[in-house]
Amino acid sequence: MTPDRTRVDAAVRAVLDGVDADPRYAHTSHLHVRLAGEMVVDEHRHGPLVGDVFSVTKTVLGLTLGRMAALGLLPDLDRPVADVLPVLGGTTAEMHTWRHLRTMTRGAEVDGPWDVDTVTALPGGQVEHVARAPQRTPPGERFCYDNGSSHLVAAAAGAVLAEPVSDFAARELFAPLGITTTRWDRDPDGVPFGYAHLRIGAADLGRLGQLVLDGGRTEGATLVDPGFLADMTRAHTPGGPPEDLGYGHLVWVDDDVVMAGGWAGQHVLVLPRAEAVVVVTGDPHFDAGPPPRDDLSPDWAPALHLVRRHLLPVLHG
């Protein structure tokens, strides 16, 4: 049921007032809300209109895989990714399947030399480096937030497509939705980062959220395979940090909410019961370095806190 607009407007004002009043939210860049398919709020505070959405990139990658599935191009979930990435042969990643990577259950080391900032700073061979991460738990046994697994997915998808997954996404996912202004950064070997560094505007994230809300269809045409999307947006594990929600396939899942989340306050919330999409973004003035730098205060907080306090109760009714 679509919520009452007057109450929604008041809740949005409470969110924005909270952003303005509390320096912990000073980096908040944009608030965008869609109800019943229509944009009802689009408030830009500061920062670039098209910014890095960090780990929200993972969920966009997931939707790109859904487009591959709709076209019959996606390998079976339980096939080893090494089938299409021979460079993984002889590494611990040789036994990891598409399912393991997409649910973040490959069980490999993610810290130390395999920490995301360390990997991103490498001058080349990032895919191979991630593939050599030591195995810590059996594949499929438990969730552990894993940037490297998403980079392996991006590399594998590119191998299947015989083109960078970012090029396929621009043509097959973004263009049909009217999304034309994006930039998806690549590693030194030309592999689009699977875990971060897609630059896209809040309104365009809203369009992607609407696609999820509409079951993968847009203007009467199937863009993302509906069965794939249903499987992607259900919890396959209890999940854990950093969002402390259940985890599907490259997306967070909670009761009545499907959520993409990224560092520095990037969040896209899809609320099926309310027919709503909520997008908040942040601008940390990030510089990848090395070493990486930002201007976030030590006690910064995501505007998601304010959205949960003021807006979600109204949307959920």
Image: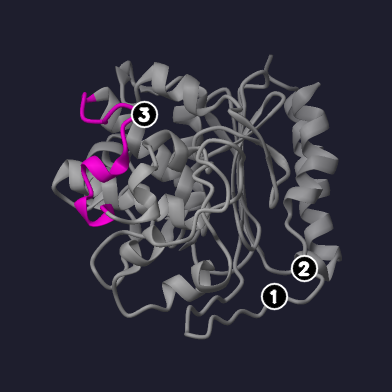
Residue 226 quadrant = top left
Q: For mark 3, what is the residue?
A: 77
Q: Secondary structure under badge 1?
A: loop
Task: Report the disc number at residue 296.
Answer: 1
Check disc 1: other Cα within 10 Å, few if <14, some if 14-19, many if 20+. some
Task: Report the disc number at residue 300.
Answer: 2
Mark 2–mark 3 CB contact (< 8 Å): no
What's the residue type where badge 3 is placed? Leu
What's the residue type where badge 1 is placed? Leu
Q: Residue 117's spot in the image, x, y percent? A: 51, 73
Q: Taking 71 as reference, is 223 left or right?
A: right
Check disc 3: other Cα within 10 Å, few if <14, some if 14-19, many if 20+. few
Which tag, 2 or 3, sits closer to the chain's start? Answer: 3
Q: Secondary structure under badge 3?
A: loop
Mark 3–mark 1 CB contact (< 8 Å): no
Which tag, 3 or 1, sits closer to the chain's start? Answer: 3
Q: Residue 115's spot in the image, x, y percent? A: 54, 68
Query: In the image, which is nearer the foreground, mark 3 or mark 1?
Result: 3
Q: Residue at x 73, y 57 (%)?
A: 302
C-alpha separation, residue under disc 2 versus residue under disc 3: 38 Å
Q: How many marks?
A: 3
- Main secondary structure type of the part rendered in magenta: loop
Residue interval drawn in magenta: 71-89
Q: Residue at x 58, y 82 (%)?
A: 293
189 or 49: nearer the eye? Answer: 189
C-alpha separation, residue under disc 1 versus residue under disc 2: 6 Å
294 or 76: nearer the eye? Answer: 76
Check disc 2: other Cα within 10 Å, few if <14, some if 14-19, many if 20+. some
Q: Secondary structure under badge 2?
A: loop
